[in-house]
Image (tube, coloured by chain):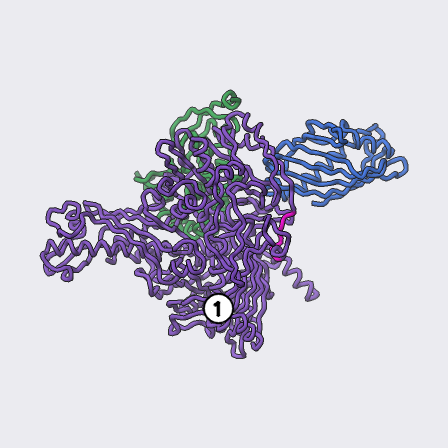
């Protein structure tokens, strides 16, 4: 599965970068996120309750940030384990570009799923991932929301 | 266990008999029928509500018992294949299935008969095409449906004849 | 005895009543005191090294009793699941068989492969327990592409590559030479799509061990319980045969998928003994998709040479067959001896050469599925013949007639190792043409065109080798067992008859047809004959039901046993009548000499109450027979499909399907028609709807009825079926077998019709509406519309 998207956030790049590295912010923005911890090696451990078509489960995600190039880009490697319902693995390249006072956020995701997720949900994973990304950035936008900038996310 | 504590009381008419039952709230109707009541004529052929082997009647209409929670049948009447006819007295639809060789391994048969009876009782007068479309929710891997369609059309006639006879009495 | 219940009568099935009233007993309907439930741990990866399996949390969970892994079965000395047919490569070397432990020990090799079994007091607890097992997998790159799999890095440690065998049959040099000289060569590259059998009853097992006696009892969904007992005893070493009872009660369809001895059933009976509690496991459909043996999955290139008069001169076939990750029980034989040997079809092609590479991939095993090799062979031959006719401007029926083996040619020895005993192929074809109203097709095509529809017609004149099999030949070709069948006829003291057969019925209606055969042969009322099958504790031995063999082999065994009954009865009667045995005839259920008459029932009574009885004869009237066929049987026929395609949507509607088959003598025409209907429906599924697809990452993406498209009632038309009869020459019933014909003949007929409608040389199976729509769009584009 390959997906990409672009958002314009009416906040300066350093702030966006900081938020993207803040487990608390990330946890708040991920729908169904039950916990998010930063581990000693810098990776994050998250528990997320999510639903893909007929499958509902608590997924344990191990997120590693690599190729850090603050505040311009990084890559998130995700290793998501859903126990008996299968797994997902993928990476998201995230790029931040200055656009005047705002920031242009681009991402490119490539992911694959396995086990029951692939067997029953393969057709639905793409849509589910798209929705999760949209929900994430909608929530992420609100982190910077002042009444004036609330409309600042364009997609 | 938690399940025990959270069991729900159910009152369901099963094949004409009043049953007072208890089951955890996540129990599927098909599991209640098969495991708790021993009505093993209702079969489970898939886990995505698509094969129709578990078809039963809820208040006279065909439903997939794997797609209903047992609690959804609370206060309702459920009829399974065991309540349709007996070895001594087959239902006209059962008789038609036998007469037309509309079954082979028999696994889909109970669900198929429950669907067929509902189709006849609540459908428009049936044609070959209408039967085929009406049975779209029931998979048979053995018969190629040819004889099932024939049986449903013959069963429809037999059910009408039985109704006439009953009306005349 | 010809009667309303004898051979040739469409007797209503006696097994139906229990199925119709919901009182049949399938494995999952059974429960035993103290029974607990098993749930398998399955790999989510197509290939991975198995690291630590942490079961500690699972073991602490409510209701969980045990978690068994491959380490446990290995430590207990459980043997591997064997492949029962040794195929040799063309260089004479044995096939390379990868070890197949019942539960994976060090590496998993397909998505869904079981590597552990969680046992708990309830099913819910077992499922919850399975969720708590934490398994450390190290993913390894999977081999998924069939065409390149052979030379890819080996998926199994210790193997040089992924080639299980490189088999060949026929005269390569003569075939090459004939093709070089041919006036025309038709070439096709064909894919035979992977199918998932999908018997409606998922597999299940209920295993029990009695420590007091040391007896094991396994109720399971098997087409051949005795064969399963043999394998579990001799190879897996669960228990010696006399301590192991296997019962296959009512079984909801098999189509080949329940022949094989699987990991799950094996693990269940083993674990039941370890735990000391009966264990039940029933597959859910998702598990069936992953872990039942799949079918077909070939890529093939084929060339047919013709001379200037349209005669076939040579056929060269190169096939790569997917065997999956492990060699299942009969898998090696399917794309070789059940495939290559059938490539002569109904024709006098003098030179044939076939090569099959059997390869390992990281997918579920591929083994026999309804037709097993013969649908693939028919598809190659009949697609080539139809294509050749189109290329050369022949009427496809005429080109077939010209090349058919003629009735006077039998017995006919093909260039690919078979001797056809009898047949009349043209008779089937002519009858099919008549029933299909071939003459009127052009008009129907025009009428469809007016409606904006594309109409096409396609043929398939198939042959199959059934009635598996002459044991000597089969063993010579690599079979690990003989392929005879056993039967026993017991005449009870009061004259009723109990029949025991090693064949297993899971939809075929043996309880009816076998009773017809014995009642007819012995002249006893049909209702007085009971048929027992599927229980190793009651039936002496058996090789089971597959390859359309039950009547031709199992039925013949019952004829032989009945003949022994009659022979003994004649001696009893001769003694009573004070005459010589030679003077006693047997007619309509009675022994007759002059004006003396003794019924079989009277003879039976005399045998059990031997008051006035031949002194040199044992009491009792019960006889057994093992019947070993002298040859395969060769059912054949002509199938004609007519389709109509909606140009806008690409939807293919199968509007007419005619099947005229020669099954030899028929015992119950009603049941035979039903077998053809079902087979054709599965063939239509293959041609138009069904496809087992693994994605490039090794995940099965058609793993449920949401994505694997099963034929439903509104996908199919009524079928037109008829039979022509040339009795089999070498079995006492003259029967050939009918179970697989529909699935063997129909895919080629339907694809020939679809390509006819579309005016293209080929379209891949399944010809779904999407495929057809794309094909139409491509055609439009290339014509510049």
Which residue is labeled 1 in the image? C440
In this picture, which residue range is highlighted in magenta? Answer: C141-147
Chain corresponding to blue in the figure: A
Q: Give the residue displayed 44% in from the left and 60% down from the top.
A: C477
Q: Is residue C473 left or right of residue C55?
A: left
Residue C771 is one of the magenta-drawn residues:
no
Chain corresponding to green in the figure: B
Chain corresponding to purple in the figure: C
x, y percent for residue B155: 38, 46
Crowd around label 1: few <14 · some 14–19 · many ≥20 (10 Å): few
Label 1: which secondary element: helix
Q: Residue furthest bottom?
A: C308
Q: Residue furthest top?
A: B5
Q: Nearer the viewer, residue C632 or A52?
A: C632
Q: Can residue C86 be seen?
A: yes
x, y percent for residue C489: 26, 50
The quarter in which the N terminus of chain C is drawn is bottom left
């Amino acid at each position: 599965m390959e997906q990409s998207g672009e958002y314009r956030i009416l906040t300066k790049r350093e702030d966006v970068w900081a938020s993207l590295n803040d487990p608390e912010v990330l946890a708040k923005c991920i729908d169904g996120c039950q916990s998010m911890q930063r581990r000693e090696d810098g990776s994050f451990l998250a528990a997320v309750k999510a639903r893909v078509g007929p499958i509902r489960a608590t997924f344990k995600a191990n997120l590693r940030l690599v190729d850090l190039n603050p505040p311009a880009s990084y890559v998130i490697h995700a290793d998501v384990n859903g126990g008996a319902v299968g797994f997902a693995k993928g990476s998201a390249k995230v790029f931040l570009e200055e656009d005047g006072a705002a920031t242009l956020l681009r991402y490119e995701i490539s992911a694959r799923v396995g086990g029951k997720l692939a067997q029953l949900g393969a057709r639905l994973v793409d849509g589910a991932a798209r929705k999760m990304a949209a929900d994430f950035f909608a929530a992420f936008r609100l982190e910077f929301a002042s009444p004036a900038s609330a409309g600042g996310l364009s997609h | 266990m938690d399940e025990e504590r959270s069991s729900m009381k159910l009152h369901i008419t099963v094949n004409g008999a009043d049953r007072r039952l208890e089951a955890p709230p996540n129990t599927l109707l098909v599991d209640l029928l098969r495991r708790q009541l021993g009505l093993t004529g209702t079969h489970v052929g898939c886990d995505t509500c698509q094969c129709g082997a578990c078809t039963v009647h809820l208040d006279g209409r065909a439903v997939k018992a794997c797609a209903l929670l047992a609690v959804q049948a609370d206060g309702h009447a459920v009829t399974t294949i065991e309540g349709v006819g007996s070895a001594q007295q087959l239902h006209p639809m059962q008789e038609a299935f036998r007469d037309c060789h509309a079954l082979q391994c028999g696994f889909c048969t109970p669900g198929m008969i429950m669907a067929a009876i509902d189709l006849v009782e609540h459908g428009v007068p049936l044609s070959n095409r209408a039967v085929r479309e009406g049975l779209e929710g029931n998979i048979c891997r053995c018969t190629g449906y040819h004889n099932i369609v024939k049986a449903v059309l013959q069963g429809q006639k037999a059910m009408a004849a039985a109704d006439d006879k009953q009306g005349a009495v | 005895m010809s009667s309303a219940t004898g051979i040739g009568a469409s007797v209503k099935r006696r097994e139906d009543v229990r199925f119709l009233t919901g009182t049949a007993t399938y494995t999952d309907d059974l429960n035993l005191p103290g029974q607990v439930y098993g749930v398998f741990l399955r790999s989510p990866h197509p290939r991975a090294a198995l690291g630590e399996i942490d079961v500690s949390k699972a073991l602490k969970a409510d209701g969980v009793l045990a978690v068994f892994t491959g380490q446990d079965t290995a430590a207990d000395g459980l043997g591997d699941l064997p492949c029962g047919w040794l195929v040799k490569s063309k260089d004479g070397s044995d096939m390379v068989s990868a070890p197949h432990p019942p539960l994976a020990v060090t590496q998993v090799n397909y998505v869904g492969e079981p590597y552990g079994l969680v046992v708990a007091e309830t099913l819910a607890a077992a499922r919850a327990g399975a969720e708590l097992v934490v398994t450390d997998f190290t993913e390894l790159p999977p081999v998924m592409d069939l065409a390149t799999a052979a030379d890819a890095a080996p998926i199994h440690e210790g193997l040089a590559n992924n080639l299980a065998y490189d088999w060949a049959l026929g005269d390569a040099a003569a075939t090459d030479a004939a093709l070089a000289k041919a006036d025309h060569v038709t070439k096709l590259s064909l894919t035979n799509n992977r199918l998932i059998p999908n018997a409606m009853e998922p597999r299940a097992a209920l295993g029990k061990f009695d420590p007091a006696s040391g007896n094991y009892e396994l109720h399971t969904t098997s087409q051949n319980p005795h064969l399963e007992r043999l394998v579990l005893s001799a190879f897996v070493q669960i228990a010696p045969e006399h301590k192991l009872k296997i019962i296959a009660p009512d079984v909801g369809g098999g189509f080949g998928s329940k022949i094989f001895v699987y990991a799950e059933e094996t693990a269940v009976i083993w674990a039941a003994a370890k735990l000391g509690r009966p264990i039940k496991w029933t597959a859910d459909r998702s598990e069936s998709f992953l872990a039942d043996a799949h079918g077909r999955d070939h890529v093939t290139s084929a060339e047919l040479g013709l001379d200037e008069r349209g005669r076939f001169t040579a056929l060269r076939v190169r096939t790569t067959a997917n065997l999956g990750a492990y060699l299942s029980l009969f898998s090696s034989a399917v794309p070789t001896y059940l495939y290559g040997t059938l490539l002569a079809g109904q024709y006098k092609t003098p030179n044939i050469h076939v090569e099959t590479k059997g390869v390992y991939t990281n997918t579920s095993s591929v083994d026999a599925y309804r037709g097993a090799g013969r649908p693939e062979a028919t598809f190659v031959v009949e697609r080539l013949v139809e294509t050749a006719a189109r290329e050369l401007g022949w009427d496809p029926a005429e080109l077939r007639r010209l090349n058919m083996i003629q009735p006077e040619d039998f017995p006919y020895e093909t260039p690919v190792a078979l001797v056809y005993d009898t047949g009349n192929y043209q008779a089937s074809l002519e009858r099919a043409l008549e029933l299909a109203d071939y003459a009127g097709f052009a008009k129907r095509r025009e009428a469809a065109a007016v409606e904006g529809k594309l109409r096409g017609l396609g043929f398939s004149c198939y042959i199959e080798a059934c009635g598996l099999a002459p044991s000597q030949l089969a063993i010579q070709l690599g079979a690990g067992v003989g392929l005879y069948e056993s039967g026993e006829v017991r005449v009870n003291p009061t004259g009723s008859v109990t029949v025991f057969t090693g064949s297993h019925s899971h939809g075929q209606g043996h309880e009816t047809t076998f009773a017809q055969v014995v009642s007819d042969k012995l002249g006893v009322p049909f209702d007085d004959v009971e048929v027992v099958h599927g229980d190793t504790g009651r039936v002496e031995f058996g090789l089971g039901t597959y390859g359309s063999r039950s009547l031709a082999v199992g039925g013949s065994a019952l004829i032989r046993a009945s003949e022994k009954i009659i022979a003994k009865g004649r001696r009893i009667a001769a003694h009573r009548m004070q005459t010589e045995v030679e003077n006693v005839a047997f007619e309509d259920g009675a022994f007759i000499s002059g004006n003396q008459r003794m019924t079989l029932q009277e003879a039976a009574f005399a045998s059990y109450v031997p008051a006035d009885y031949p002194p040199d004869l044992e009491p009792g009237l019960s006889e057994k027979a093992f019947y070993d066929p002298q040859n395969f049987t060769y059912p054949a026929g002509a199938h004609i499909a007519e389709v109509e395609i909606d140009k806008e949507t690409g939807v293919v509607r199968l509007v007419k399907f005619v099947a005229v088959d020669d099954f030899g003598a028929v015992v119950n025409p009603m049941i035979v028609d039903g077998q053809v209907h079902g087979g054709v429906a599965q063939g239509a599924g293959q041609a138009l709807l069904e496809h087992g697809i693994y994605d490039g990452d090794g995940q099965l993406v058609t793993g449920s009825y949401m994505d694997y498209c099963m034929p439903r009632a509104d996908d199919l038309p009524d079928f037109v079926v008829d039979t022509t009869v040339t009795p089999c020459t070498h079995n006492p019933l003259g029967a050939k077998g009918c179970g697989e014909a529909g699935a063997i003949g129909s895919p080629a007929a339907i694809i020939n019709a679809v390509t006819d409608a579309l005016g293209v040389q080929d379209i891949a199976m399944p010809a779904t509406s999407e495929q057809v729509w794309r094909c139409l769009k491509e055609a439009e584009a290339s014509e510049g519309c």
